[in-house]
Image: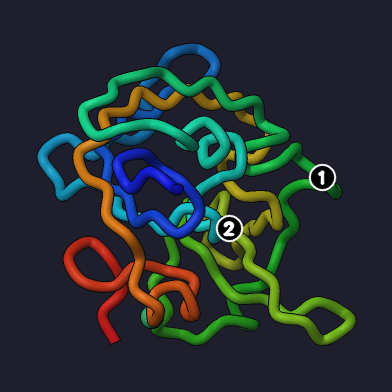
Amino acid sequence: MSNPDVIQSGSVAQFHYTLRDGAKEVIDSSEGREPLTYLHGASNIVPGLERQMEGKAVGDKFTANVPAAEGYGERTGEGPQPVPRSALPEDAPLQPGMMLQAQSPEGQVVPVWITKVEETQIFVDDNHPLAGVDLSFEIELVNIREATDEERSHGHPHGPGGHHH
Ligand code: ZN
């Protein structure tokens, strides 16, 4: 018998978190916001955190240390590359940290992140901004329920904190 009170594959769980980097600087936090909602076993969150959520119960507070390789991955490639602004829509709001959809030479759509904005060019990096960063999540688990069949087939939660569509 599976125990619905702990996180397992097919659980929809909600948690509050504070995310710190290897130097213990706060990167992000759900404080003052709705808790994060995810479907366990569907890769909605980074693998190293998902693995450490397994078996946890409502009310549990713990710290999950996630090395970069199990977080947003190690940095790869050549780093930020210049793109002329003329190659971008004129009214596009461009800010460091923003994600854009680029097309690879093979024609695939790949995400890239803006690292720098200059007058005539911007720099984009195909590494996630947190690639190569060791992560430390302070977690407080606030809710667990079973996913609906629809959520399981979509691979993400619906309702409060989930997808609306
Ligand atoms: Zn859906």
Q: Is residue 108 left or right of residue 142?
A: right
The answer to whether the beta carbon of the residue marked 1 is less than 8 Å from any atom of ligand 1 is no
Q: Judge the density around disc 2: few (<14), some (14-19), many (≥20) Cα neighbours within 10 Å.
A: many
The reply to whether residue 96 is in sight is no
**In the image, is 132 to the left or to the right of 43?**
right
Residue lying farthest to the front in this orientation: 1
Q: Identify the image quadrant of the C terminus.
A: bottom left
List the residue tagged with mark 2: 113
Q: Real-space Cα distance between discs 2 and 1?
A: 14 Å
The mark closer to the camera, 2 or 1, is: 1
Q: Amino acid at mark 2?
A: Trp
Q: Nearer the viewer, residue 145 or 3?
A: 3
* Residue tagged 1: 76
Residue 100 visible (yes or no):
yes
Of the image marks 2 and 1, the number of the one nearer the N terminus: 1
User: Residue sitting at 33 percent across and 48 percent down?
Assistant: 4
User: Relative to 40, does residue 105 appear above or below in the rendering?
Assistant: below
Q: Residue at x 64, y 57 (%)?
A: 123
Q: Secondary structure at mark 1?
A: loop
Q: Quadrant of residue 6?
A: top left
Q: Mark 2: which secondary structure?
A: strand
Counting from the top left corner in percent of width and height, residue 85 is at 59, 74
